Image: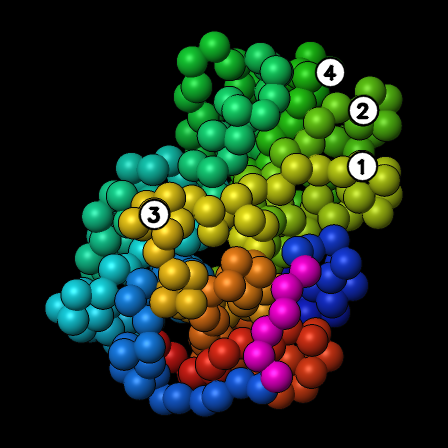
Amino acid sequence: MLTRDAAIDRYNAIRARLPQASGPAAWSSANNLGALAAEYDVFVFDAFGVLNVGATPITGAHARIQALQAMGKQTFVLTNAAGLTDAQTTAKFCALGLDFEALEVISSRQICLEGLKRSFDIRRWGVICPACGLPDLPGIEFVDLITAPDGLDDVDGIVLLSTTGLPDTWCDGLEVALRARPRPVVVGNPDLVAPRETGLSKEPGFYAHDLIDRLGIAPVFYGKPFANAFEAVERRLTPGFPAAKIAMIGDTLHTDILGAAARGWGTVLVTGHGLYRGANVDQLIEISGIVPNWVIPSI
């Protein structure tokens, strides 16, 4: 687990590696999303820290989504959780009592696998994804590097989908293998941390940026804050849909807010449950230079 201050410091340290965006000169505050419903037609929710904390749903999230849907608003989940299959992801939200159809849940895993098919000519990938199903793509072999770490020598690329439950030392072997034979590294979850019931877990993005520092490599990231995540939502909307009528609701400045601002979306920072719970949010915004349109404690 990582402390909040350490996570925030790390996000600020890697800021130059993330998309560039301009936001409003100042932000506004509201009690919840109800006050903003008239401003936007599409509401895109981050999951961790907005809808749930770990496996626990956030009180009122289900009712808010139902209210928005009853008003005719389109609702989506855009999550960087890449350790679950599409069916498992949809089932997770159903178990949390959240009313999302399968097409409304967009994960960075989906986006990553599309990227592997479209952008790489590699037929044997090593996958870091403990306790989750391997991807299934025609013509591509995936090797589970958790159960078969010796497979590192035999794969032509590395995919980081999940690091849940792994000790910090797991990445040492990967570093040695990449020094010996550099290969493409693809990251299906750019988050540095995720809020859990017991604290902040280190996510694939945390280790990917460590590898950048150590090896000077250039991983390919799929998920927020990178454009490929937001484009996946936009493709589900009417062509030419105005970006300013889309709201991204998230708990992290450097992923949810930054990436959405780079696309011209409206941005809503949720502070009561995730990374910034109990923090001086005004100070965090000032230090990061990433300014949301709105700040609310909960949806």
Q: Against 190, is 14 above or below?
A: below
| Residue type at the position of mark 3 | Pro
Q: Where is residue 281 in the image (x, y as percent from the top left)?
A: 59, 84
Which residue bears the numbered disc 3?
A: 239
CA–CA distance between discs 4 and 3? 45 Å
- For marks 2 and 4, the one nearer the N-term is 4
Which residue bears the numbered disc 2?
A: 182
- Mark 2 surroundings: few (<14), some (14-19) or many (≥20) residues within 10 A: some
The stretch in magenta equals 20-25
Residue at horizontal 68%, vertical 60%?
20
Q: Against 51, is 180 above or below?
A: above
Which residue bears the numbered disc 4?
A: 153
Q: Is mark 1 on a helix, strand or loop?
A: loop
Which residue bears the numbered disc 1?
A: 217
- For marks 4 and 3, the one nearer the N-term is 4
Circles 2 and 1: CB atoms closer than 8 Å: yes
Circles 2 and 3: CB atoms closer than 8 Å: no
Query: In the rendered image, which quarter is residue 157 located in?
Result: top right
Please say whether residue 22 is one of the residues in the magenta stretch.
yes
Q: What element carries label 3?
A: loop
Report if residue 60 is visible in the image: yes
- For marks 2 and 3, the one nearer the N-term is 2
Lateral position of residue 34 relative to residue 186, left or right: left
- For marks 1 and 4, the one nearer the N-term is 4
Lateral position of residue 250 relative to residue 172, left or right: left
Residue at horizontal 60%, vertical 31%?
159
Q: Is mark 4 on a helix, strand or loop?
A: helix
